[in-house]
Image: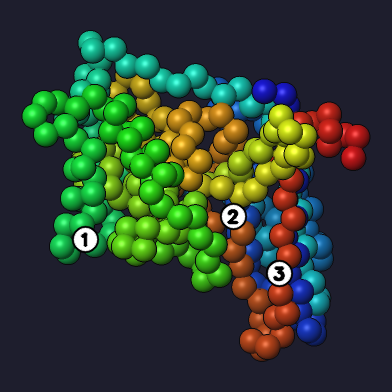
Amino acid sequence: MPLLTIHHKTEYRYARPVAFGEHRIMLRPRDGHDLRVLESRLDIEPAPMRLRWIHDVFGNSVAIADFDERAQTLAVTSSATVDHNPAEEFALTPDDKAYFYPFLYDDEEFPDLVQFITPQYSDPDGELSAWARKFLDPDAPTPTFKILSGMTHGIREAFIYRKRHEQGTQHPLDTLQTRSGTCRDYALFMIEALRRLGIAARFVSGYLFVPDDRDGHVGGGSTHAWVQVYLPSAGWIEFDPTNGIVGTRDLIRVAVARDPRQAIPLHGTYLGSADAFIGMEVNIYVVPADEAAEA
């Protein structure tokens, strides 16, 4: 894959000047052996009184902006160029302990994985557990990849993608019962299903790169969310139930978290009346770096 440039601009508009509280910005791609950030820039208008960077509890890069100026607009623009080398789809052999389910995590790793194995959302009637068990072979150990790919493609094929205007992520039971949701809803649903099988899973927030297709339609990109699963001998592996992707093809990782509420790309407050807020506009493109240079 070529070098990619991500441009993400969010602009808030207000009817009259307002003051701004602290804003937390989680837009910088997350470095790794398969993703290297070559250049990154964050522009904010009006300029914040103070801008500092931290690593959160999961090691994600977070910018925290504090303001001392009132304004009718707040624009946050993040640009980054990354060297993205998608990992090959993982391949376990029958000699690997995680080849078949059920399997055990190493004693040394288990304490660090507990938070990703423990379900976080209620399932009083066992509906999530029952759905997860549908992917198990009833009479023999099940190949682990069969479970993971089955869930990934099962959500992709049986659920309907639906944009929602409500903030946050819906409860996994709502996703199951309506068979619909956003990419964040799908990711959380699959995570909770896996946790009920004792498989460590966490939430990933980032970008989806959409290449130009063979018919000449122009590609692009969007914010996106998917799942990472931890397997002995394989480590953290990506699964995207929205698009049926296994591995990191077309996926640009920004943040990982136990719960979606810990990986919100941009979050902040303003001080003013509720009717002062007019609206928000978000513009995102993800393109090969040479195309971005020509634009």
Specify the color scheme.
Answer: rainbow
C-alpha gap between disc 2 and disc 1: 28 Å
Q: Residues within 10 Å of mark 2 (few under 14, many from 20)?
A: some
Q: Residue furthest left?
A: 139
Is residue 163 rendered to the left or right of residue 68? left
Helix or strand or loop: what does disc 3 sit on?
strand
Q: Amino acid at mark 3?
A: Met
- Counting residues from the start of the chain, the first of labels 2 and 1 encountered is 1
| Residue drawn 23% across the image and 38% down it | 135
Q: Residues within 10 Å of mark 1 (few under 14, many from 20)?
A: some
**Residue holding disc 1:** 123
On-image quarter of the C terminus? top right
**Residue holding disc 3:** 280
| Residue drawn 41% across the image and 52% down it | 159
For this rendering, which residue is in front, 183 or 120?
183
Q: In this rendering, does residue 54 appear at all?
A: no
| Residue drawn 61% across the image and 49% down it | 223
For this rendering, which residue is in front, 172 or 259?
172
Q: Residue 4 got which mark? A: none
Q: Amino acid at mark 2?
A: Pro
